[in-house]
Amino acid sequence: MAKAHYFNENLNNNISNPRNFWRTISNIQAPPVHSQPAAVKVNNQTLQHPLDVANAFNDYFVGCATTLIAKLGNDMQSERPHAGQAPPTVQSPCIRQEFSFRPVPVSVVTKLLRKQKMKYQSGPDQIPAMLLKISAPAIANPVATLINESLATGYIPKLWKTARVVPIHKSGDSTLVSNYRPISLLPVMSKVLEKCVYTQLRDYYQYWNYLTPDQSGFRPNHSTTTALLKVCNDIQAGMEQGNLTGAIFLDFAKAFDTVDHGILLEKLKNSGIGDRTLTWFQSYVSDRSQYVSISGSSSLLLPVTCGVPQGSILGPLLFTIFINDLPNVCKASTVHMYADDTVIYTSKPNLPQLEAVLQEQFTEVEKWIKNNKLFLNTDKTVTMLFGTAPKLHKLQNPHLCVGTKSNGTLTTVTSLKYLGMWLDPNLSFGPHIEKLSSKLYPKLGALYRNKSCLSPAVRKQIVQQMLMPAIDYGDVVYAAAPQTHLHKLTTLYNSLCRFALQCNYMTHHCDMLKELNWPSLESRRTLHLSSLVFKSISGKLPPYLNRLLPPAAPSSYNLRSRTSTLLAYHNTKRQWLGPHFPTEHHNYGITSQTPSNLPPVLSHSKAPY
């Protein structure tokens, strides 16, 4: 009784404070677990002193990339390009105007300092973000001078290139350093500098349209959902034509941590970065170091000789530039990337043709990986064969045979988690819905066991903010899944509503939805699909999706709909319009000229992507 009273009061007091609210929810479900262990095992020895533990973690984190390079690079060293030598796939300079830094105004620095979040931990300089935020008007001028001096001289202070690493436990044995994820904390001042550089560099590449359209990671108007829509739509198009689609899902080993600095700088130069500006980037990636902090004890400082800086603002963009030319080697197939999550696929009428093309393309990709000094985990790189059920049933052996340079064969799987969604050979999304249900029902059970600690308002907020996002994620992708699968999600949704209201199992779902003022699950999907269509018409989706929703040809008759931008209607066997958009969305009549024509339900909601 005391426990229920304590948590009830705590949650109700913090219902508008997300950080404290969800921390309390976590404490209800399970006792707090210390992410940093008191002891670790290294070489069959148990280390307990905080300094020894910190050094063990730092040795492991720094050694992961260097060990991989030493292990896989020695036997191919003669075949790989030397540091600073451009691989053959790097684009030749095609940008007319050379990139150089512009002076950063004091107003921009002031704005960046004021945007710092109070919860950010301090880096090695021990300067908290809160201090910089509240003192922004007083320090903006000297900070702007420091930033502009750095850009002009091509020099970055050593302290700004030092990271404080905090290990966070992932899962498994808490005494093994391999079960921890490194979280790098950089000085806040260095992030302000990086943000200034990032903005100028991003705008430059966007203006010259340099980045490949096949990359959805770290780009505005792109997301994992748009990437899934692109890939699944292409596979579905192959099914509509009666073809088989073969896909290779690449798994890079420590891709961000093994980026070769010499090749990265050469790619920056080939993308239009001038020599003087390149000096700054050379200073940025070189002479970096890190240490691990455990219980107030700090490890020795170790150099970081490869990879893009973890926890940085520029790191993701630099990696995008590094991997930007990968699609160039795949002339006979399609490549799509989300950061380093890469899939190569193509469609052919029969299996022998499909295997021949995929083998040729994969061989070229392996050459690209070798030339760029990246490393492919062939054990986790898998293939998948897509097609309609009748088409796959006719095959005696529905597997793809794609060989590797080490004379191995890639594994063919029948289900795969790609960008958070489980794919199956028929794109029925049955496995995804099964996995989703098996994930949410145990969470719901744990909440039921602690229902005495949760008030009605808290239960409703938990369902809306903790459980529903999992159902909403990617619902525009699986919206046209068979009703037998979608019905399972409806049953799950009704269970969530029942928990929020604490009503008995005989209560009709319509009464629950009316009481909660929530739409049905089908209406939620319709809402998200409609929002996606409107974003496409408004130009707020990637070009590869905008092309799939062309406007309809204008009517020769003087109809009222002539002033609207109607979408082209596509008749397909499985009732899809463009990238998994059910055909009923054609009837909304959303226009780009009159945004007020957006259906009312879309004006007050936000899609989950």
Image (tube, rainbow, N blue to C red):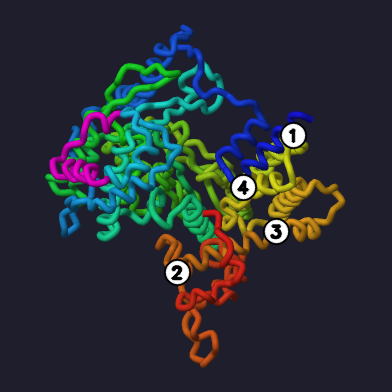
- In this rendered view, identify the residue nearer to me: 423 or 188: 188
SS class, disc 1: helix
Cβ atoms at labels 4 and 3 below 8 Å apart: no
Nearer the camera: disc 4 or disc 2: 4
503 left or right, relative to 146: right
Q: Residue 518 carries which label?
A: 3
Around disc 3, counting alpha carbons within 10 Å, would you say few (fewer than 14), some (14 to 19), or many (20 or more)?
A: some
Q: What residue type is labelled 2?
A: Ser
The residues tagged by marks 2 and 3 sit, at their Cα atoms, a distance apart of 27 Å
Query: Which comes before the other along the chain, label 2 or label 1?
Result: 1
Pointer 4 residue: 465
Cβ atoms at labels 2 and 3 below 8 Å apart: no
Q: Is residue 148 magenta?
A: yes
- Look at 63% across and 52% down and name the residue there: 428
The residues tagged by marks 2 and 1 sit, at their Cα atoms, a distance apart of 50 Å
The magenta region covers 140-163
